[in-house]
Amino acid sequence: MKLLLHLAIAAVAFVPTHAVRADISSRQINDALSKLDASVIAWRRDIHQHPELSNREFRTSKLVAEHLRKLGLEVRTGIAHTGVVGVLRGGKPGRTVALRADMDALPVVEEVDVPFRSTLTAEYLGKQVGVMHACGHDAHVAILMGVAEALAGMRRDLPGTVLFIFQPAEEGAPDGEQGGAALMLEQGLFKEPRPQAIFGLHVVAGIPSGVIGYRSGPFMAAANSFQIRVTGRQTHGSQPWSGVDPIVAAAQIVMGLQTIVSRQLDITALPAVVSVGKIEGGVRSNIIPDSVEMRGTIRTFDSRMREGIVERMTRTVEAIAASSGATAHLTIDSASEPVLVNDPALSELVLPSLRRLVGPDRLKVISLQTGAEDFAYFAQEVPGFYFFVGVTPPDTDVANAPTNHSPRFFIDEQALAVATRALMTVAVNYLQGGSSHQNSVTPTR
């Protein structure tokens, strides 16, 4: 309750500086969203209980499309398979801003004991797996649904146009499929209307509930997925000398890959990560298999560093396999999520409104994040600003809070009120002129 009281006080006190118009006040924003706080939580719980994997967000997209139609928005569906876009045209002329939420869940078995816990399963990579909103996309969808309803209720006073983007497959399309932000853009997402700016947020564990974290300029890493296939020669487990053991070679490769970042890169310049997330090989305890497959991810902030990592990985993988009589082949997926860059001018434009909303002590500059986010594709097309909202409950140590993607990931739902007000505030602030820096907002690349 203290956090909500602070927001209410901040909303009354906040008057945007340098505004071209002030038709919609922060008091109005807070009042409109206060009526929707309970609905946002209810939507989030419903979506959480019915998670869907990437490119399979059928129920979620239907829920979103029906909600937007009830609000009287122009609605497009089926973009990038299951994506939904709503267009709200304000009653006054002005610019166009886009707001984005991602919809997909993860192949994770939920371990959080809540009444709306997910018990669903689905097929992933040929196996039946549990499905959970272990990253918070359920909250993102509910937040944007709430912002859409609040803005629709004040469209007569709204200058310009708002594009609401509900994106599928942020976690990556299934093997053999396209999806996500890149496919939405390829299919004409920004053609009509084309936004001049885009905003998005992510709820994050490890940050106290209601605290907003941001970084101007490069913010989140580029990501490449990789696969390694190690081929040996199958034999009986009791006679390993009769074959070539790809499991031992694979284990040595995993250890060898860890020396690339720790011993071969200058990590004082920029951080980098090479992680193996999956190893699969063999069917019985007493059979040494023919082959092992590994999958992993590379995270970087510099293209030359990424090229150097791939070169070293290739050498390491092939040489270690050859030393044991096996062979190995490294494949880097052609699709690479770019570095997410927050446009510096746009960041400067909206930060004063966020600072007034939550208070200067709850708006934090955070470090470079090695997580990746395909919001980066949108931010390559138009100036973007992406920020984090902390969801770690006050009674939980942030250092030990289960992280995003954990089966124990937990959201303090009180933080959703902060998220809705923050997203709506930056959108309205932008449309109403923001500040004298507005004319300097240009694409970062």
Image (spheres, rainbow, N blue to C red):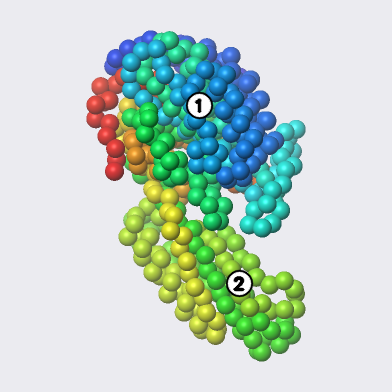
Tell me the mark number nearer the camera, choosing from 2 and 1: 1
Question: How packed is label 1: few (under 14 Cα within 10 Å), some, or many (20 or more)?
Answer: some
Image position of 161 with respect to 173: above or below: above
Residue matched to label 1: 75
Image quadrant assignment for residue 286: bottom right
Q: Are marks 2 and 1 in contact (CB under 8 Å)?
A: no
Query: Who's the residue at 36% across and 65% down the image?
Result: 308
- Image side of residue 445 versus residue 427, left or right: left
Image position of 116 with respect to 88: above or below: below
Disc number placed over residue 360 in the picture, else none: none
Image quadrant assignment for residue 58: top right
Query: Who's the residue at 36% across and 13% down the image?
Result: 92
Residue 73 location in percent, x, y? 50, 21
Image position of 419 with respect to 401: above or below: above
CA–CA distance in space, label 2 to label 1? 46 Å
Among all residues in the image, which is located at the extreme bottom? 242
- Image side of residue 364 versus residue 237, left or right: left
**Residue 55 visible from this viewpoint:** yes
Image position of 238 with respect to 262: above or below: below
Instruction: Compare residues 384 and 148 and report the one nearer the observer.
Output: 148
Residue matched to label 2: 292
Mark earlier in primary sequence (2, 1): 1
Query: Who's the residue at 49% across and 16% down the image?
Result: 152
- Label 1: element kind: strand
Query: Who's the residue at 54% across and 23% down the image?
Result: 68
Q: Label 1 is placed on what type of residue?
A: Val
Q: Label 2 is placed on what type of residue?
A: Val
